[in-house]
Amino acid sequence: MEAIEERAIDATFDVEYVTRVEGEGSLRLRIRGGDVVEARLSIFEAPRYFERLVVGRTPDEVLDIVSRICGICPVAYQMTAVRAFEHAFGIEVDPSIAELRNLFYAGEWIQSHALHVFLLHAPDFLGYPSALAMAADHRELVERGLRLKRLGNDIMALLGGRAIHPVSIRVGGFSRVPRRAQLAGIRARLDEAVDDSVATVELVAGLTAPAFERERPLVALRLPGAYPYADGRIASTDGLDLPPDRWDDAFSEEQHEGTNALHARTLDGRVYLVGPAARIALGGEGLHPLAADLLARHGLVERIRTNPYWSIAARAIELVQATASARDLVDGYRPRGAPLVAWQSRPGRAAWSTEAPRGLIFHRYEVDERGLVASAQIVPPTSQNQGAIEADLRAFAPSVLGLAREEATLRLEQLIRSYDPCISCATHFLDLDIEEESR
Amino acid sequence: MIATLDRRPLSSTRRPLVATVIACGAPDRGDDGAAAAAIATLDPEGLAGIRVRIVNHLRVEELLDAAELGPVVVADAAVGLPAGVVAVIPFDHLVRVARNVRVRSSHEMPVADAVGLAEMLLRRPLAGAVVALGAGTVAHGAPLSEPVRAALPRFALAIVRAAGGEARSTPASVPEPRTCRTAGDPVTAGPPRDRERPARWDR
C-alpha cells in the first residue's frame, strides 16, 4: 500500500535549511498531479528529553532546568513552571512580586519581538535577503531594533540575574529583587522604547503583505481588563473557555513521522494557531490604551486575525504593549517585605499556561509525596503551531510551484518566518525539499 | 581586506586588554559546549589580557559591546566541519565567503551576518576571527565526543592565539591549527606552524 502511494507522487520540493528562523529544520513538499498533497516541516534536531530530565527534581531545580530549553524565551518556561507549582501548592505571592514577574516577562517579549520584527521578518517586506543587506539602506531601523532588543535583555538581566537562562526566579517569588534605584536606570530608557515601538507600528502598518487569508482556530489566554502574560483563561476563536491549568482537557500531543517535535491538536484532531495574532484577536480589548489606539487607528485587527504575514504588525503592537506596560510597572513598583514566601509542596498535579512571545505555552507536572517531580509535559508554542503552519504551506505552495526554485524557496521561507517558529523550543530548525518523481 | 597576524612576542602577565573572546554554546548539549570547555582547560595566566564572555548564543549586541574594547574572537562548535577539526576564519574572510552561501545557524542570526551588521553599525571593519571546532554530537545531555575532547587543547590554543594571547597550559605536543585564508570552503586544520610565536591582531 505504501509503495503504491509513493509511486503516485509526481514531485517533491525540498528547502534544506530555512534561514532566519531560530533553530534548524527543513521543509518538504510532495506534489501529485500539480496539487501539493503534503507539506512537512521537519524538525530533525535530536530529541532533547527535558520532560525526562526534570523527573526526580525539586520544583526550584525544575525552574533552572526548563530555562535551558530556549535561549530566546527562557522566561516563558520559568514563568509557566513557577505558576504551575505555586497554583498546586496554594502559594500566593505578593502583588508587587506578581508585577515584577510581568515586567520580567515583558522584557522577554521586547527582546524576542524586536529580534523577529527588525532582524528576521522586516527584510522580507522591504525586499532584502537579510538584515545585513537591509541595514545598508535602513540603518536607523536596525539601530532601533537593537536598541529595543538591548532594553529587553537588560530588563531580563536586572530581574533574572542574566538575560539568557536567568536564575533568580524561585517558587514563592524571587531569590532577590532589584532596588528602585536599579529600576530607575531602566525607566529612563522606557520612554524612548515606547516611542520606538509606536514608530514601529506606524512603519509596519504601511507595509504591503501578500494576500493570503486563512481561517483557523486561534488560541490564547484571555484576561478581562488586561493583556495576558501569565494569567487568564484559555480561550479560542471557536468558543473554548478553560482555566489555565486544563489545556489537556481540550488538546493533546501526537507523534508525527519525520519530526522530533510532537504536534498538538484539538481533541477532535484539528490544527490551530497560538501567538501574537491569537492574543490580539482574542484579547485585544485588554491592550494598553496606547497599543489599543494604534491597533484601531490603523485598522489592523482583521488583517492580523486572518493573514499570517500580518503577524509582523501583531508583534509591533505587542512591542508597544510590552514597553508601555513595562513603564507603568516600573512607575508603580513598591517593594514590600521579603521577595520570597515560605511554601510546602503538595503531591498531585501542577499545571499552568502562560503566554510566551510566540504564543501559549503549557506545563504539567506530577509531584510525588517527597515533593519531587514524577512526570512532566511541556508544550511549547511552535509544536502547537506546526500543524497549522503545514496546512497553510499546503494551501500556499501551489502559487509558487511555477516559479524558479530560488524564488519559490524565498516565498515559502517568508511564509514560514511569519509564524516566528522557534524550532529550538520545539526541539530545533528548517531545510526546503521538493521531490520530483515520474509516474 | 584580510586581517593580519602580528607575530611579535607579547608579555604574558599584567597585560592590558588584548581582545575579547566570546565563547558560544550550551555546555549541556554535547559538543556545543566545546568552546567553554576549551577555555576551562587554560591556566588563567594564559588568558592574561583576554576578556572572556561565555554565552549561549551569539548576539549582535554582544559583538558591538566587545568591539568597543578591541578585537573579538568568536569561539564556537560548528556542524559543517568534521568532528575535532579546528578552523580559524578571519572576520573579513567570513563575511566575504558568506555572501555566496546559504548559511545554517542556530544563533539569532548567522555569525557572518552578525559580524557584518556590527561592522556596518560601527562604520569600520571588525578586527578578529571565528575559531570553530567541528562538532560530533550536540544532543542534549550528551558528553563531549571523543574527537572533540581530544581536540580541546588545539581549540584552546587557536582561540588564545587568535586573541593575541599565550596559551601556556596547552600541551606543546598538540598540533596547532592554521588560519584559513582561501576563498571557498573555510575548513582548515593542519600541522604546527610558528608554535613559539604568539599572535596578536593588529589593524
Image: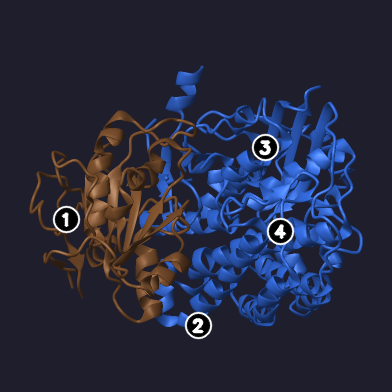
How many C-alpha atoms fall within 10 Å of the one at disc 2: few (<14), some, or many (≥20)?
A: few
Q: What residue lies at 28% left-to-right and 40% top-to-bottom?
A: B152
Q: Is residue A212 above or below residue A12?
A: below
Residue that carries the numbered disc 2 in the rendered image: A140
Residue that carries the numbered disc 4 in the rendered image: A105
Q: What residue type is labelled 4?
A: Tyr
- Mark 2 or mark 3, which has the lower sequence index? 3
Q: What residue lies at 55% left-to-right and 51% top-to-bottom?
A: A71
Say whether marks 4 and 3 touch (CB < 8 Å): no
Say whether marks 2 and 3 touch (CB < 8 Å): no
Q: Can residue A309 be seen in this view?
A: no
Q: What residue type is labelled 2?
A: Glu
Chain ID for blue: A
Say whether marks 1 and 2 touch (CB < 8 Å): no
Q: What residue type is labelled 3?
A: Val
Assign a secondary structure to mark 2. Answer: helix
Cα–Cα gap, marks 2 and 3: 41 Å
How many C-alpha atoms fall within 10 Å of the one at disc 3: few (<14), some, or many (≥20)?
A: many
> Which of A143 and A219 lies nearest the eye of the viewer?
A143
Q: What subunit carries mark 2?
A: A
Q: What subunit carries mark 4?
A: A
Assign a secondary structure to mark 4. Answer: helix
- Mark 4 or mark 3, which has the lower sequence index? 3
Instruction: Tell me: A314 left or right of B1.
Output: right
Q: What subunit carries mark 1?
A: B
* Same chain for the residues under marks 1 and 2 in the image: no
Q: In this view, does B186 lie above or below A252?
A: below
